[in-house]
Each structure stands twice: as C-alpha cells, then as structure tokens.
Image: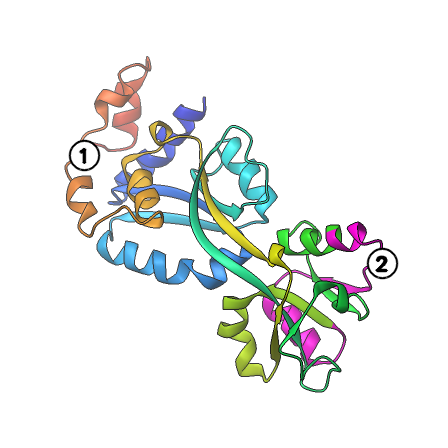
Amino acid sequence: MENIESIGVELKEYARGVRGFVRLRANLGAIVQFLPEDLGTFLASNPEIMVDLGERSSRCVVDEVERGIADIGLCSSIMDNGRLERVRYRSIRLILVVDKDHPLADRREVSVRETLDYYHIGLQAHSAAYQLVSAYAEHVSVPLKLKLHVSSFDALLRMVQSGLGIGIMPDAAFEAIGKPMGLKGISLADDWVERQIDIVHRGEETLSAAGKFLLRHLSGGLQPGANDCLNKVVSIRPLLRGFPDWKRIVANEAIQ
C-alpha cells in the first residue's frame, strides 16, 4: 500500500512536468545551518526534481522515515534510528549564548555545569539540544532553571537579547543569526557538546531515482549533472505492471 501511494504521488508530479519527487524531513539545526546551501546547489543542477522539505524534531524525523511518510531524514545522532540506515552528514558544536551584560559575557569558555546557576531559555522539549542539557542536569543532580520553551533559534535569541535567560544552541546557527544581534557566543568545555547530524533512510532500494541522487548529494557522493541520468527514466510503466489496474493508473495520470 505504501508503494501504491508513493507511485500515485510520483505519477502526479510526472504529469506536471516534474521528473522526480523526494520527501525530506530535517531537524531545525540542519535546516538553519546547512540545507539552504546544499539544496540550492542540488536543485540548481536538477531543476526537474521537486523536494518536499519539512522541519521536524529529530525524534519525529526518525518516526516519519520509519513509517514511510518521508524518504530521507536529517536528525541528531543521539536518536535511536531503529532499523534505518544511517550516514554521517555534518558535525556541529553547541555553544552558550548570553547578552552582553550577563555575568558570563566576559568568559571565553565555561562548563555546562556553570550555566546551570542561571535561567535557561530552552528549545522545544523534544529537541535534541534540550534533551542533552536536561539529561546532563539530571546526571549532576542540579535542577535545570528553565524560564520557558521556544520553538526556533531566532525566538531563543530574542529571549536572550531581552535578558530573560541564557541559551544553548549550535555554533553555526549562532554565527548566522545571533552574532548580528549583538549577543555573545561562549565555548562550552564539555566534550559531549560536539555532536553529529546524520542522514537516515530505509535503504537505497526503497528510494526513487531522485531520492538516490539527493542522498548521494547530501552525503557528498553526487557529481553535477545527475539530472542527465534522471532524464533517461522516461517510462514508469514497468514499475506498475504488477498492479491489476496499471493501465488505468497511467491513463488517469496522463502519462504517455
């Protein structure tokens, strides 16, 4: 049934002149820090491929890929990927963000333990960054002074800018949107703040040609001009011959 639904979606895209369709889900860190450039170069070389991108928590990314709602996912490496295949994507490092008048603003490096003396602005409760900090606080038996949860990096930065608390977020995201706000990014001394974003999928055999091209591009294995190969896939009729109504499906979707 999943295959039939997937074929139905791809047939509609073919009818509209799109030669490939990929459902991509990614956590906030990947979307803010890396995907704009990576998708920009991919789509510039492959304009006939449509990528349906959705932002999810890392846990939801894994869930949607496992259930076949998404083809490819980008999530924190701390998430249990179950039966999914995992490929390394990018490394990131968490840093502390404070306003310029905060008592820690003059420090070049602090430990996460020191940050627990102050009120935190946390990302959404199911985000990987918040779960790491919360688990650490529990491990050292120090309550996490959480002021409030927010759902995005820019919201976290605005709260820090207003003096409501401090925040922990990826360094590249801070460089992109936090530094211009006059905030201070401080290195964290703990080893565990270095973490990984992974690509997860159910196996290359489950991906369409477009999905395989995107997977190889994100993992560094795709050369420019992949669309030239994709254009050779001009007929999907052999894929449908196993279904009793394949002729009706083709006719209804105007695939010639």
Circle 2 packing at 10 Å, graded few (<14), some (14-19), many (20+), is few
Q: Position of residue 212 (x, y in %)?
A: 31, 38
User: Disc 2 marks which residue?
Assistant: 143
User: Disc 1 marks which residue?
Assistant: 233
Q: Which quarter of the figure is the C terminus placed in? A: top left
What amino acid is found at the position of numbered circle 1 in the picture? Answer: Val
Q: Which quarter of the figure is the N terminus placed in? A: top left
Q: Is residue 13 visible?
A: no
- Residue found at x 54% / y 39%: 62
Q: Secondary structure at mark 1?
A: loop
Q: Position of residue 7 (x, y in %)?
A: 35, 29
- Residue found at x 42% / y 28%: 5
Q: Is residue 249 visible?
A: yes
Counting residues from the start of the chain, the first of labels 2 and 1 encountered is: 2
- Residue found at x 27% / y 22%: 239
What amino acid is found at the position of numbered circle 2 in the picture? Answer: Pro
- Looking at the rendering, which quadrant does residue 232 occupy? top left
Residue range in magenta is 136-165
